[in-house]
Structure formats: C-alpha cells, structure tokens
Image (tube, helix red, strand yellow):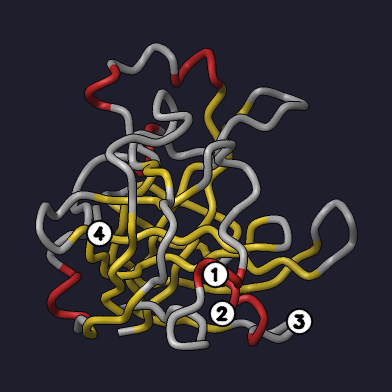
C-alpha cells in the first residue's frame, strides 16, 4: 500500500537517515523502516527524483500494514519495494495543527526514558514521535566521541528541555560555538532502547523555523 506522508523528520541514523512524517489521510505519525528497524533508510531507497526528501515535502511511499518494534515505536511501518514519489508540498500552517500543546514530551522532561518505565505505559498510550512549537535556543557541545553536537533548549507546557538535534541538514549547517534563537516547529523522536543501558533517548529529528 502506498501512503502519502508530510515529511517532518530527516535525521541522521548511523550512515543513513531516519525519516518520519504525518500521513495526510489519517493524520497519524508514520516512520518508514526496515525489518530490523535499526539501520535507517539508505539513499538508494529514500531518494525522490534523485534528491533528498526535504521537510514539508509530501512523499508517496510504499509501506506494509505493520512494522518492527512497535512495542516501543508504534509508528513504525515496513518499507516495501518501489520508488518514493514527491506529490506535493505542505505549508507550516498546514502542519502546525499537529503540534502537541500540553503535557510532557514523550513521557517525561528528561532526554531519555528507561525501558522499565516505558513498559509501565499502557500500549495504547505509547508513542515515539511528536511535534511541538517553541522558542528555541540552539547551541553546540561535544559528543562522547568529541564531535560537534547541536542542542535545542526550550520550554514547553511550563517544562524545560535540552535535547540533541539530529536533523541532518540543520546540524550540518550549524557552526561550532554558534548560538541562535528561533521560533520553530520541532519533531522529537524517541529512539529504540540503547543496548548498553536500556534507555530510549530523545532527539530533535526535524527543525522547521517559522
């Protein structure tokens, strides 16, 4: 089955990308992925007319009715064979209605959640993607490997957050030691459990400045 998604996340994952968006028919979040769910989507699969899918593009993608690891990432749908096709472009106004307006972002105010706590959440209440609108302060730090890492600091529903940015283009273009303040739509993604500590970590997988 082919589904049309408004692309709201194009995030680095390993050497590939994590792509996610809103189904234009259902209004639900969808994360196209392969059976393992771990390796991301390679260029050979995700390219649209020989170009990278851009945020707000509406892209038609062949997807199965189910996907892997839906216990922690219920938005996952398995990618089927077939070319991805760009069929339109959404506006900021059109996608802003999907922003979460209240409550904590993906279960808590921390940048991670342990699987023990995640398993306590009722299955029907689990999610691993959301979008918020916020005034964001961007800054840089370093990863444990000593590489540049961009952070988004912002308030949402009276809580404070500081979450790493993995939006590939935004992170790549953001210079070390730079700071910036901007009103943004942020797509926040919760990763699968990290095998070393059994935590699921949050990332800003899409940044749309408004």
Characterize the local packing of mark 2: few (<14), some (14-19) or many (20 or more) Cα atoms within 10 angstroms: some
- Find the distance from the CA under tag 1 to the CA under tag 4: 25 Å
Secondary structure under tag 2 reads helix
Report, in whole angstroms, how far the alpha carbon at label 4 lies from the one at label 2.
29 Å
N-terminal of the two: label 1 or label 3? 1
Q: Residues within 10 Å of mark 3 (few under 14, many from 20)?
A: some
Residue 113 visible, this orientation: yes
Label 4, on which residue? Answer: 2
Q: Which mark is residue 176?
A: 3
Drawn side of residue 104 relative to residue 153, left or right: left
Labelled pair 2, 1 in contact (Cβ < 8 Å): yes
The answer to whether residue 77 is left or right of residue 191 is left
Give the left or right position of residue 20, taking residue 168 as reference.
Answer: left
Instruction: Give how far apart the Cα atoms at labels 2 and 1 are.
Output: 5 Å
Q: Residue at x 63, y 76 (%)?
A: 171
Counting other residues with Cα less than 10 Å from the Cα at mark 1, is it few (<14), some (14-19), or many (20 or more)?
Answer: many
Q: Residue at x 68, y 32 (%)?
A: 194
Q: CA distance from mark 3 to mark 2?
A: 12 Å
Query: Disc 2 designates what residue?
Result: 170
Closer to the camera in the image, 7 or 163: 7
For mark 1, give the secondary structure: loop
Reading the image, the residue beneath label 1 is 167
Work out whether mark 4 precedes mark 3 in sequence or the reverse, and give the earlier one. 4
Residue 167 quadrant: bottom right
**Relative image position of residue 28 (x, y in whole percent):** 19, 49
* Residue 161, horizontal then vertical, whole percent: 47, 52
At numbered mark 3, what does the secondary structure look like: helix, strand or loop? Answer: loop
Q: CA distance from mark 1 to mark 3?
A: 16 Å
């Amino acid at each position: 089955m082919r589904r049309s998604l408004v692309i709201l996340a194009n995030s680095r994952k390993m050497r590939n990308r994590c792509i996610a968006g809103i189904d234009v028919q259902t209004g639900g979040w969808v994360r196209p992925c392969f059976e393992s769910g771990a390796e991301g989507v390679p260029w050979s699969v995700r390219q649209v007319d020989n170009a990278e899918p851009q945020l707000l593009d509406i892209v038609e993608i062949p997807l199965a009715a189910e996907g892997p690891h839906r216990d922690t990432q219920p938005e996952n749908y398995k990618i089927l064979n077939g070319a991805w096709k760009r069929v339109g472009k959404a506006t900021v106004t059109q996608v802003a209605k999907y922003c979460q307006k209240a409550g904590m972002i993906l279960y808590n105010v921390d940048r991670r959640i342990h699987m023990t706590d995640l398993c306590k959440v009722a299955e029907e209440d689990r999610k691993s993607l959301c979008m918020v609108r916020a005034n964001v302060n961007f800054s840089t730090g370093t990863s444990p490997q000593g590489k540049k890492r961009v952070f988004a600091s912002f308030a949402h529903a009276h809580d404070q957050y500081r979450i790493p940015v993995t939006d590939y283009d935004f992170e790549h273009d953001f210079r070390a030691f730079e700071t910036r303040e901007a009103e943004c739509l942020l797509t926040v993604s919760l990763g699968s459990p990290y095998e070393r500590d059994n935590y699921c970590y949050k990332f800003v997988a899409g940044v749309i400045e408004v």
